[in-house]
Amino acid sequence: MKGTLSIVGFGLSTIGPGTATGLIFAAYINGVARQPEARSILQPIAFLGFALAEALAIFGLVLAFVLK
Amino acid sequence: MATNEDGAFWTIIAYLISGLGFWGGIGYLGDRHFKTNFLTILGMGFGLVTGLYLIWIKFIKENPPQ
Amino acid sequence: MLLAPHMAQPAFVPPSSADFFFNPAFGNSILATKPVMLLLFSVILITAFFTVSARKAAILPSRLQFSGELIYGFVRDGIGRDVIGEEFQRFVPFLFAIFTFVLTNNLFGVVPFMQFPTMSHIGFPVSITIFVYLVYHYVAIKKKGLGRYLKEMCFMPGVPKAVYVILAPVEFLTYFAVRPLTLAMRLFGNMFAGHLLLLLFTLGGEYMLKSALFVKFFAILSFGLAIGLSFFEMGIQCLQAYIFTLLAALYIAGALADEH
């Protein structure tokens, strides 16, 4: 087998953000479904959570390229 | 612009990538120039914060939660 | 050792990126390879379908005309009007061409006997992205002028002056490099990975079929999974064509929008 271990590390590092994104949007959809008028309040919060979770995934992606 | 929900996710990702890429890249070049090894990771952290700040300006400050 | 392959059988070779390159059907030209052929075939197919469906346009549409209008209406109303806004009519042909082109080429990945998504070669998504890139910058520069476009792009209001030094290059990079890059990479990556997945299960099933008797039963599982994943891939291929067009429309809308 050939390849670098960095890619495996990146794969592992996406598990957390993936789960987090799923949970965030599950909660967001739940909230909007229960109270459609709360959409404008929930949307920025959901985006903030999404950005914070996704930042870690992209950090992992860049580290996979940087680390040797 | 880009308050559209479908596009916002990809815009967020694009900001994070470019923030990390730009300041991390500058840190990498600094590392090569000054023969150090901490500037890359410092630049990446800084770029991450920059990207998050941009997202905060574009998506969260403009339509604040009441 | 029931699970071990026969001694005579060579080890399993997993599919790799080498499986995405084809020898030319004739001659030495790269234009005679399978992806390019599929691309040309898709153009002929799209042109023929929409010419035929629109030729005998009637008030009471035939089934063919209805299906053609369904796709057109989806792109015009669902993507064009909803995203771009009042000036959408100008961009509908462009978006429609992108959508049908990408969709047809993606769907070649699951059509029997073709089974190769053209977009899993990075050159094709990149060339479509170049068109999108040119269009949305051209639209913005024509509407606002180069100076104002750059100023609005890099210097958003409501930020302290000193912070612009940090933010402006990141914004610039986002608009000029990362957006088109992610646009092309997303389509390419999805098609590449999807095709690789199908290849893995098909080749794995084939290998198991040649192995010991006990292992042969797992081949059925592998082939079944390959068929199931083909349908899953079909969904992904439609979704990726939609997302590609949607993002192209969003970038155009962003170029047209007046910021404050």
Image (tube, rainbow, N blue to C red):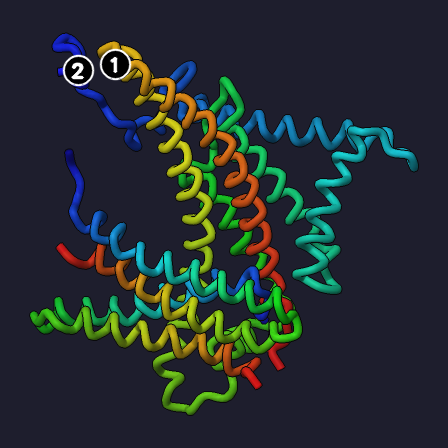
Tell me the amino acid under the disc marked 2: Leu
Residue lying farthest to the left in this orientation: B35
Mark 2, residue position = C2
Callout 1: SS:
helix
Find the distance from the CA under tag 1 to the CA under tag 2.
Answer: 7 Å
Nearer the observer, C130 or A37: A37
Residue C215 image point, x, y percent: 26, 16
Residue lying farthest to the right in this orientation: C59
* Disc 1 to disc 2: CB gap under 8 Å: yes
Query: Taking C85 as reference, is C217 above or below it?
Result: above
Q: Chain of mark 2?
A: C
Residue visible at 70% across and 27% down in the picture: C48
Residue visible at 42% across and 14% down in the picture: C26
Q: Are both tags, 1 and 2, on one chain?
A: yes
Q: Earlier in the sequence, mark 1 or mark 2?
A: 2
Mark 1, residue position = C214
Tell me the amino acid under the disc marked 1: Phe
On the picture, is A41 further left or further right than C225?
right
Residue visible at 75% across and 46% down in the picture: C73
* The C terminus of chain A: image quadrant: bottom left
Callout 2: SS:
loop
